Image (cartoon, rainbow, N blue to C red):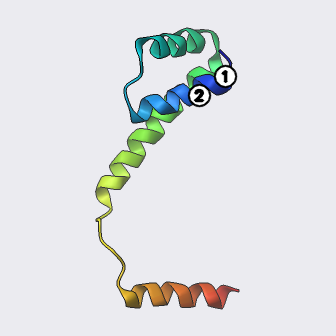
Amino acid sequence: MNCEKITYLIEKGQLKDLKLSEKLRIKLHTYMCKCCSNYSNDSKVLHTLLQSLNKEIPDEQLTQAEKDEIKQAIKSMQ
């Protein structure tokens, strides 16, 4: 398998369980490929950080006044 397919499997594994064959492909490839091994480690760290950040942000909607304020700020930048 090439690096592009392996990085796809790495990311897929962050979102759902992989088949045993997919896990073995990743293990074998990352054992031989330092770049994909680094990518796998970085992906795990990033995924963990994003999950913790998602828990810190309240699940609230913006008020209409806040939306209008953002729109006005964007217009003034143009």
Q: Are marks 1 and 2 in contact (CB under 8 Å)?
A: yes
Q: Is residue 54 left or right of residue 2?
A: left
Pick whichever, 17 or 76, lies toward us.
17
* Amino acid type of the residue that numbered disc 2 sits on in the rendered structure: Thr
Q: Is residue 21 above or below residue 56?
A: above
Percent x, y of residue 32: 63, 9
Residue in the picture at 33% in, 74% down: 61
Instruction: Indicate which disc residue 69 carries.
Output: none
**Label 1, label 2: how many angstroms apart (C-alpha)?**
6 Å
Pick whichever, 65 or 53, lies toward us.
65
Percent x, y of residue 53: 37, 53
Q: Is residue 33 left or right of residue 48?
A: right
Q: Is residue 31 above or below residue 65?
A: above
Q: Is residue 67 above or below residue 16?
A: below
* Amino acid type of the residue that numbered disc 1 sits on in the rendered structure: Cys
The residue indicated by pointer 1 is: 3
Q: Answer few, some or many: residues within 10 Å of disc 1's Cα (few below 14, many 20 plus, some between 14 and 19).
A: some
The quadrant the C terminus occupies is: bottom right
Secondary structure at numbered mark 1:
helix
The residue indicated by pointer 2 is: 7
Q: Is residue 43 above or below residue 38?
A: below
Q: Quadrant of residue 36?
A: top right
The quadrant the N terminus occupies is: top right
Residue in the picture at 47% in, 11% down: 21
Secondary structure at numbered mark 2:
helix
How many dots with numbers?
2
Percent x, y of residue 76: 64, 91
Residue in the picture at 38% in, 88% down: 64
Percent x, y of residue 6: 59, 22
Q: Answer few, some or many: residues within 10 Å of disc 2's Cα (few below 14, many 20 plus, some between 14 and 19).
A: some
Residue in the picture at 54% in, 12% down: 25
